[in-house]
Image (cartoon, helix red, strand yellow):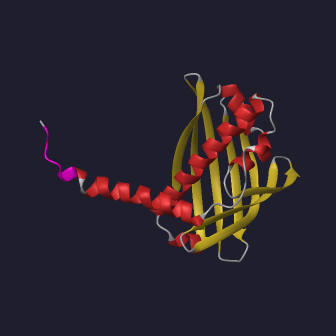
Amino acid sequence: MLIKNSFDVSQPLDTVWQSFQDIPGVAACLPGAELTDDLGDDKYAGRVGVSMGPVKLRFAGTAEIVERDEPGKRLVIDASGADERGRGQASMMITARLTSAGRGTRVDLDQDLQLSGAAAQYGRGMISDVTAVLMGQFAANMQNRIEAQERGEDPDSVTTGASVSGFAIGARALRMALTRVFRRFFLPYQPNAS
């Protein structure tokens, strides 16, 4: 399934692109992610933990940068892993495109996600909502990390790779789903105000 997310960072394009080259720093911005080893040649081992409702998953696997287009500010990452308790597998091809947006930077992410096992039981809407929540947290962490670097502070002091609360994600995703349902079913029935 293809999931698209976008977010803005207030720093200039070259600054944000440089931050995306620091893979341990990027991993620190993603809630629930932990980089465990640099395997060399742009390949990394790590874990990602997330809770969706009653299912708590912790994937261990690898991520490899398969394309780095400096002039086009485009990065492609191939990631795959298996749940540590054997309840499923995930693979994802992530394409990040950075473009100037005024004085800041626009980051567009395309995530081609394939799931099997326990995580696959959730519908596309729920997975998209959970991803949107995680990307919102990722964007805030990336912004905070870049600002800390600009102030000369240790960027690792402002971001965390701790596991994401299933309740917090579930509550935000449920709110997004209910908003979608409300718009779909109730807004079309409003009388025309012309």
Percent coordinates x, y for residue 120 in the rendering: 55, 70
Q: Residue at x 68, y 61 (%)?
A: 163
Q: Residue at x 73, y 44 (%)?
A: 158
Horizontal side of 153 relative to 55 (left or right) equals right
The quadrant holding residue 67 is top right
Residue 143 shows in this picture: yes
Percent coordinates x, y for residue 78 in the rendering: 70, 53
Horizontal side of 56 relative to 189 (left or right) equals right
Residue farthest toward the bottom in the current orientation of the protein: 86
Q: Residue at x 76, y 57 (%)?
A: 34
Horizontal side of 83 relative to 169 (left or right) equals right
Predominant secondary structure, magenta span = loop
**Count of marks overlaid on the render:** 0
Percent coordinates x, y for residue 27 in the rendering: 73, 49
Q: Quadrant of the C terminus?
A: top left
Residue 69 shows in this picture: no
Per the rendered image, the range of residues in magenta is 188-193
Residue 154 shown in magenta: no
Q: Is residue 72 above or below residue 109?
A: above
Residue farthest toward the top in the current orientation of the protein: 103
**Most foreground residue, 6 or 166:** 166
Q: Is residue 92 above or below residue 153?
A: below
Percent coordinates x, y for residue 43 in the rendering: 81, 51
Q: Residue at x 71, y 28 (%)?
A: 15
